[in-house]
Image (spheres, helix red, strand yellow):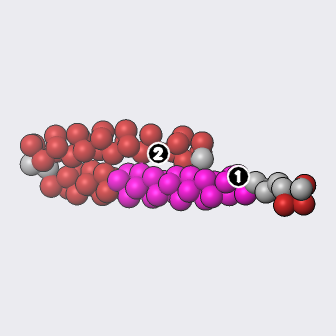
Amino acid sequence: MSFANFVFYPLVIGCIIAFIIESIFRAQDKAPQVLRSMAVRKYFWRQAWLFNIIWFVGYFILLIANRPGQGVMPDMIWQG
């Protein structure tokens, strides 16, 4: 879980930086750089979503696995 947290935040920051760089290149009308920066942004976006999904799946698996067991009922019938 902590590895997914460790990887997710830099990917989001990288996606934001790539979006800013892509916007700058679009404003300057540089086609080759726009395509490259768009590919980098899409990569960071997909990886961030992937690790986000991995985190949620891992969280729910741990939530189910660490569920407390059902308590033992006392045997009150035979105590008279």
The spot of residue 23 in percent (x, y) is: 16, 43
- Could one spot residue 58 in this view of the protein? no
Label annotation for residue 18: none
- Between 62 and 30, the one nearer to me in the picture: 62
- Could one spot residue 77 in this view of the protein? yes
Disc nearer the start of the sequence (1/2): 2
Give the residue pinned by disc 1: 68
* Amino acid of disc 2: Phe
The structure residue drawn at horizontal position 25% and vertical position 54%, both measured from the top left corner, is 38
Label annotation for residue 8: 2
* Amino acid of disc 1: Pro
Q: How many marks?
A: 2
Rendered position, 5 above or below 65: above
Q: Main secondary structure of the magenta part?
A: helix
Q: Residues within 10 Å of mark 1 (few under 14, many from 20)?
A: few
Real-space CA distance between mark 1 and mark 2, rounded to the nearest whole angstrom? 30 Å
Rendered position, 71 above or below 13: below
The spot of residue 36 in percent (x, y) is: 27, 55
The structure residue drawn at horizontal position 89% and vertical position 56%, both measured from the top left corner, is 80
Rendered position, 54 above or below 14: below
Q: Is residue 68 left or right of residue 58?
A: right
Quadrant of res 9 = top left
Magenta-drawn segment? 43-70
Q: Residue furthest right?
A: 79
Mark nearer the viewer, 1 or 2? 1
* Callout 2 secondary element: helix
Rendered position, 27 above or below 60: above
